[in-house]
Image: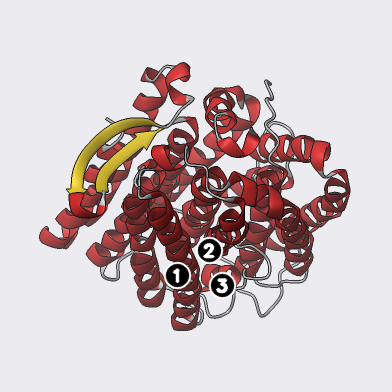
Amino acid sequence: MIAWTIYITFAGAVLLLLLPRAFARGIALLTTVAGLALGLIALVRTPIADLAHFRTIVQVPWVPALGMQYHLAVDGVSLTMVLVTGVSALSTVLFSWDVEHRQNEFFFWLLLVVAGCYGVFLSADLFLFFAFYELVIVPKYFLIAVFGSTNKEYGAMKLTLYSFFGGMLVFIGILTGYVTAGSLDLNQLSQVQFSPQLQSWAFPVLFLGFAVLAGIWPLHTWAPTGHVAAPTAGSMLLAGIVMKLGSYAGLRVAMNLFPQGFQMWSKWIVVLAVVGIVYAAAVALRQRDLKFVIGYSSVSHMGFVLLGLGAATALNLNRALPFAAFTFVIASAASMGIPGFSGFAAEITILIGASKTYPLAVWITGAGMVLVAAFTLRALKQSFFGETKPDVHLQQARVALDPDWNEQQPITTAEKCGACLLMFTTFAVGVYPKLLLDRIMPAVEAMRFLK
């Protein structure tokens, strides 16, 4: 059933082109609700034991002459990412409920991004994986260039050029694996013993291509400008899903296909991750624009993800304000890694695991965590509890805005529902991370780079 997350989302996008504007919001809402529901059904109905390996759910010939297949599969890691996509997609629709300008087109591009992300997380054929991966780039561009704000053309083009540069490296790595092994099947390729010489250069090319989208330092500069230029929904998609594509692909493809190459280069991944954590957090602390703070905080948080990948240590862990201010406080707590929220569960797992292999990196990362807390608290204070400056516009139940911001409506019911969904998710994962860890860890431990 989980394969239908792709089909339903694409179908919703097509309907948006065919039906009148009056149906746009309803179609987008029903489509994203259906995608999240299918992910939750799969979570409940799939035995944990079945999620330890990348299990085929659909496999039919596509281009037999080249060995390409329409091959979808799922394990604990991909299922978790499908759920993240479902939650993020539904939230973006709710936060975009008051979009009036070219409504059908807006939700069309949004659903294409979501459908492409579902496809990436479920693909088990390398070419299909690459096709979905590249599919995400075009709608991202139009979401920002058409519906964005500050320097939207520059931000959209910069994001697109960086993405295509990373995609070029990814294509070289995929082509190398295909020519050498004669297969595009991820399950088959994970059993192939590539030569150490090939892995020594193929792994960094492939991993770096994916890491560009994950915002690895120093190829991260597209992320802050993209966040600032993007509409709210676009910024949420970038931080919530799109940047995760790069880290997921690095794990699923680069690290699992070229484990020896990963061992050769893992120290450099850790170095770049630690620099990214500390640097991006320090820059975020100096920003006056809240969207730039969010953009650099995303780069800093993705540094933690890359640190976890570089450390490659499997670790199992079992354990009344205005609405806008309340929501921001909850998001800040999660961002700072306070116990009880998803950020804590994620970061403590990464740091404990990394301490076994790279203890010095963990100590340096501690400075980055202090800076994360500093810029988060600063943004919280200036947005809701600081003195109002004459050159900053305030609107009821919203954060302080730049002078050129022209949206003056109060928070809508749809936006409140989207915020509640995100708060519930981050709290649920923080309180009971075992729900996802039990499904993720067997799949990670089955990958070759840990053996």
**Mark 2 / mark 1, whichever is N-terminal:** 1
Image coordinates for residue 77, horizontal then vertical, percent:
50, 35
**Mark 3 / mark 2, whichever is N-terminal:** 2
| Residue at the spot of label 1 | 168
Residues under numbered marks 2 and 1 in contact, where contact means CB atoms less than 8 Å apart: yes
| Residue at the spot of label 2 | 209
Image coordinates for residue 422, horizontal then vertical, percent:
51, 41
- Residue 446 falls in image quadrant: top right
Q: CA distance from mark 3 to mark 2?
A: 14 Å
Residue 411 appears in the rendering: yes
Residue 71 as seen in the image, left or right of residue 335: left
Dot 1 falls on a residue whose secondary structure is helix
Which tag is nearer the camera, tag 3 or tag 2? 2
Dot 3 falls on a residue whose secondary structure is helix
The circle drawn on residue 222 is 3
What residue is shown at x 30% (from left), y 57% (from top)?
112
